[in-house]
Amino acid sequence: EDQVTQSPEALRLQEGESSSLNCSYTVSGLRGLFWYRQDPGKGPEFLFTLYSAGEEKEKERLKATLTKKESFLHITAPKPEDSATYLCAVQALSGNTPLVFGKGTRLSVIA
Amino acid sequence: GAVVSQHPSRVICKSGTSVKIECRSLDFQATTMFWYRQFPKQSLMLMATSNEGSKATYEQGVEKDKFLINHASLTLSTLTVTSAHPEDSSFYICSARGRGGGGSYNEQFFGPGTRLTVL
């Protein structure tokens, strides 16, 4: 069974304090690993797709990396507006399958 | 590109009534649509998957007679909550995957969600 585990469950950072969120996964053949950001009361917003080990993608203060077992979302010098829940999901190779989501990491950045 | 809209954003209804939620892909063809519900401070729970023109596939434990899903076109899917009860109160989010701009999307794009409150 495909599984995604995210850690920590919650993270509180001071503004400017860089850190990383972890996403560990097991999947029967990886089609893609996806990162989303979700603000309270809103739908998830797509951030990145990673397809193969060693791949990295960046967007502003965020950088996502991928290995064969896990992905990291690195946040450099975060700002209060980066506060949100970050969701990781995987899609298996087999067929048109839905994403399997982790429970998310709730990030709070304090000014 | 890849925008998904939902309507309404909020709905309050009386127990026993039915509520319809619309989900549209605005700038791409959604060959597959997904419906999720989310309780406060919890992750997304997949309810069903639908391919355009086909019957929806429901996840275990989701009542297909209560949550009617129609995916009649490549840009529109609807979720109807029939005979709603207070325990159906939740945040419902649709998501779409498909093709546009000359290519296919592996990504699922999400709508903004609909907050349903059943009194």
Image (tube, rainbow, N blue to C red):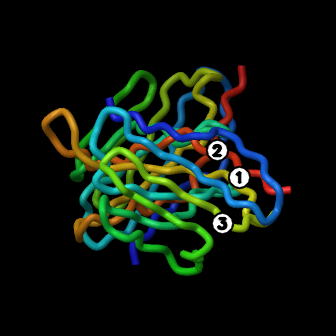
User: Which three-letter amino acid code belongs to the residue tagged 2?
Assistant: Arg
SS at mark 2 in the image: strand
Mark 1 and 2 residues: CB-CB less than 8 Å, in contact? yes
Pointer 1: residues within 10 angstroms few (<14), some, or many (20+)? few
Give the mark, 1 or 3, whose residue is nearer the N terminus.
1
User: Which three-letter amino acid code belongs to the residue tagged 3?
Assistant: Thr
Picture coordinates of residue A53, whole percent (x, y): 23, 52
SS at mark 3 in the image: loop
User: Which three-letter amino acid code belongs to the residue tagged 1?
Assistant: Lys
Chain to which mark 2 belongs: A
Where is mark 3, residue-wise? B82
Chain to which mark 3 belongs: B
Q: Which mark is residue A111?
A: none
Q: Residue at x 59, y 48 (%)?
A: A105
What separation in Å lies between label 1 and label 3 (alpha carbons)? Answer: 25 Å
- Horizontal relation, residue B34 to residue B113: left or right: left
